[in-house]
Amino acid sequence: MRRVASGLMALAAVAMFTACSSPTSTTAPRKPAAPKGAEYLVFYAEGQQRLAREAVERAGGTTVGEDARLGYLLASGSGGFVEQVGADRAIVGVSPDRSIGFTTNRVMAPAAGRTGSKSFPDAGSFTRNRAGEPLAGRQWDMRMIGADRANAKAPGSKQVLVGVIDTGVDGKHPDIAPNFNRGLSRNFVTDKPKDENGETLDGPCEVSSCKDPVDEDDDGHGTHVASTIASPINHIGIAGVAPNVQIVNIRAGQDSGYFFLKPSLDALAYAGDIGVDVVNMSYYVDPWLFNCKANKADTKKQQLEQQAIITGMQRALDYARQRGVTLISALGNESVDLGNPKVDKESPGYPTGEKKVRQIDNSCIDVPAESGGVISVSALGPSGRKAIYSDYGVEQTDLAAPGGDALDGKGAKATRSILAAAPERVLRAAGRIDAKGEPKGPDVVKDCTAGPCSYYQYLDGTSMAAPHATGVAAILISRFGKPGKGGLELSPATVEDLLYKTATQKACPTPRQYVYKTYGQTVTQDCGGTQADNGFFGHGVVDAWKAATVEP
């Protein structure tokens, strides 16, 4: 699910915020017409492909495809197929080929009768920043990390490809189009109108194939992320962290915000195959917020599914990283110490009505945030404190970046969130702009400075923090990368070292048990670690200006 915090209607309650060219023909999944039965991704142990095929047959299933790059078969089976095939020693995990992920932002929508309009400054109360883009005055996030200064000195290179693995990107948005690479963009998702229970999932398909064009985003999340990374300097709206790099839409998320395992695998493999330099992953792989290999509260089938998610995603992440892709992820919006989780009440989150309460521990992981080789980012509010909703943990937090926090101050204000591009059609569908195209609240901003009007939206979440780090990574790759596949290349290990080297270290608050006070309630979170590496801020706050000026 996407890493977006839940919005002002949940703010007053203040409990915990719930934070693709096709693969090569020699290794891509091959799908002849499948017999009746559900389809599964069957992951096998290294070198056990033949034995895995035999195990599928013994379990009464049929192999209908495979991906040798990531070590899995696509199999059709019914009845007790999963438990039977999963019992074979050659098999390390089995997952349904269905929706299993969720993105991570919080929509800033006004709460009727709760905060009132006085909680927000008027949308027109800001004075245009004459020295920058029209809405630059609203971008406290860019000033926090020095991106406003870095834009002029090191805006990034067109030879750098940034993959946005998300719900899609509105490639026609005026503040994204100049940097959008339509030719390389891919959509690995087919819209699904209803879930297995007949409940609305994505809603009616917009096109007959139910496969949206590569320049559309019917959710808005991926567009916001892409805009933060690379909105160009074009006298329209805002500027991103790296306003001259290319955005490649590698869509793996449904219109509804859920993600399928297989599209996530395909997206990562594709990024590695075409020479993408860095990918942004602002989502967690669902239906399990925490993936446990052998939790006693889960059935054998559920355990096999979680094993498949852990194993499959790690293989895909390794595949991409070994081919030069730096991996950056949102940390999560549950206000949880990921080094000491206790309870998971959100899993399985798909289909609807399946959630249960599980006791968990540190052996259970959030994927991809806690997967190996991934740089995970916590979120900050405008005061510089860790956002109330952001997950944390000494072993889990690698970096911190602005993610917005409407509660970071007196009352709740949308302008404490992150402003970035939004698709007009999504805002219309959500009722955030009226029939004349005027915003209905301060969470949406309209800019008509340079001709055709464009729209922007304030969102909170670690989803919004991660793209700031991704943009800084793109600056570093632009400066220090060497010619290679796709344009420029810089090893992920080097990018990671430079991100840490240029980050501004930030110590834990004093006292370390930080108390958030909101609407008469208090929430205490404990920051462990040193100034150089701690649970709230990791190795420090990303710094675009240092990235633009650091010597090799």
Image (cartoon, rainbow, N blue to C red):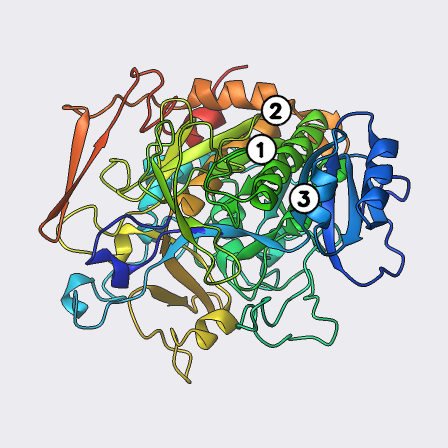
Q: Nearer the viewer, residue 104 or 287?
A: 287
Q: Secondary structure at mark 3?
A: helix
Nearer the observer, disc 3 or disc 1? 3
CA distance for labels 2 and 1: 8 Å
**Image position, residue 116 (x, y; %):** 16, 69
Q: Which residue is disc 2 drawn over?
A: 492
Q: Nearer the viewer, residue 500 or 80?
A: 80
Q: Nearer the viewer, residue 505 or 49?
A: 49
Residue 83, which numbered label?
3
Q: Amino acid at mark 2?
A: Pro
Q: Are marks 2 and 1 in contact (CB under 8 Å)?
A: yes
Q: Amino acid at mark 1?
A: Leu
Lower sequence index among marks 2 and 3: 3
Residue 100, which numbered label?
none
Q: Quadrant of residue 487?
A: top right
CA distance for labels 2 and 3: 38 Å
Q: Amino acid at mark 3?
A: Glu
CA distance for labels 3 and 1: 33 Å
Lower sequence index among marks 3 and 1: 3
Q: Which residue is disc 1 drawn over?
A: 327
* 493 over 259 or under it: above or below: above
504 left or right of 38 in image: left
Nearer the observer, disc 2 or disc 3? 3
